[in-house]
C-alpha cells in the first residue's frame, strides 16, 4: 500500500489499526484496501477420511471446480457441492428458505442474459386451469 500510495500513504492510521485490531481482522482490512473487495472471516476445518473415501471426494471437488471455474478454492467447491445436496434434500423436507438460498448461490454463476432468461420464465402470466397448479 505504501508503494502504491507513495506520499499519500497514511502511515499513522495503518500503524494504529495494526496495533488495535486482531491479526486476522487487520489482514482483511489490508486485503480490502488492496483489492477493493470485502473478505469473509475464515476458519480451517479438519476432517478424518478413510482412504477408500478420498477418490470420491477428490472427484466431486474436481468436477465442481470444472463447473465453477478452476480459479475457485476447494473450500468454495465443497460449499457448492453441499448447497446442491441441501437443495435436493430440502425438496423432501419442504424447507423453501433453504432451497431459495441454494438457488441464489448458484445464480451467481449465470451471465446477465441467463439470469434475465431465468427470471423471465417465472414472470410470464400463466393461466391456472382445472386442478393444475402453476407457480407464477
Image (cartoon, grey):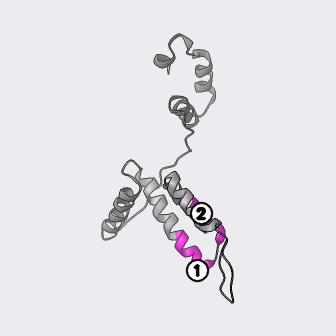
Q: Main secondary structure of the magenta part?
A: helix
- The residue that appears at 69% across and 89% down in the rendered structure is 130
Q: Position of residue 129 (x, y in %)?
A: 68, 85
**First along the sequence among labels 1 and 2:** 1
Furthest-bottom residue in this view: 130
Any mark on residue 92, and which?
1
Identify the residue position indicated by label 2 in the image: 120
Tell me if residue 78 comes above or below residue 9 in the rendering: below
Task: Estimate how packed mark 2 is, as few (under 14), some (14 to 19) or many (20 or more) residues with alpha carbons within 10 Å.
Answer: few
The residue closer to the viewer here, 84 or 132, is: 132
Q: How many numbered marks appear?
A: 2
Side of 84 where 127 appears, left or right = right
Q: Is residue 88 magenta?
A: yes
Q: Which residues are magenta?
A: 86-105
Marks 1 and 2 close (CB-CB < 8 Å): no
Question: What is the distance, in whole Å, between disc 1 and disc 2 at their CAs?
Answer: 27 Å
Amino acid at each position: 500500500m505504501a508503494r502504491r500510495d507513495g506520499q499519500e500513504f497514511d502511515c499513522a492510521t495503518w500503524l494504529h489499526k495494526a496495533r488495535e485490531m486482531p491479526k486476522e481482522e487487520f489482514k482483511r482490512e489490508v486485503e480490502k484496501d488492496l483489492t477493493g473487495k470485502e473478505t469473509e472471516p475464515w476458519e480451517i476445518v479438519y476432517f478424518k477420511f478413510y482412504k477408500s473415501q478420498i477418490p470420491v471426494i477428490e472427484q466431486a471437488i474436481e468436477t465442481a471446480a470444472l463447473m465453477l471455474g478452476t480459479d475457485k478454492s476447494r473450500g468454495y467447491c465443497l460449499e457448492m457441492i453441499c448447497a446442491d445436496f441441501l437443495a435436493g434434500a430440502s425438496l423432501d423436507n419442504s424447507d423453501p428458505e433453504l432451497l431459495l438460498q441454494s438457488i441464489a448461490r448458484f445464480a451467481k454463476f449465470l451471465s446477465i442474459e441467463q439470469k434475465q432468461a431465468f427470471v423471465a420464465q417465472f414472470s410470464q402470466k400463466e393461466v391456472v386451469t382445472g386442478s393444475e397448479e402453476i407457480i407464477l
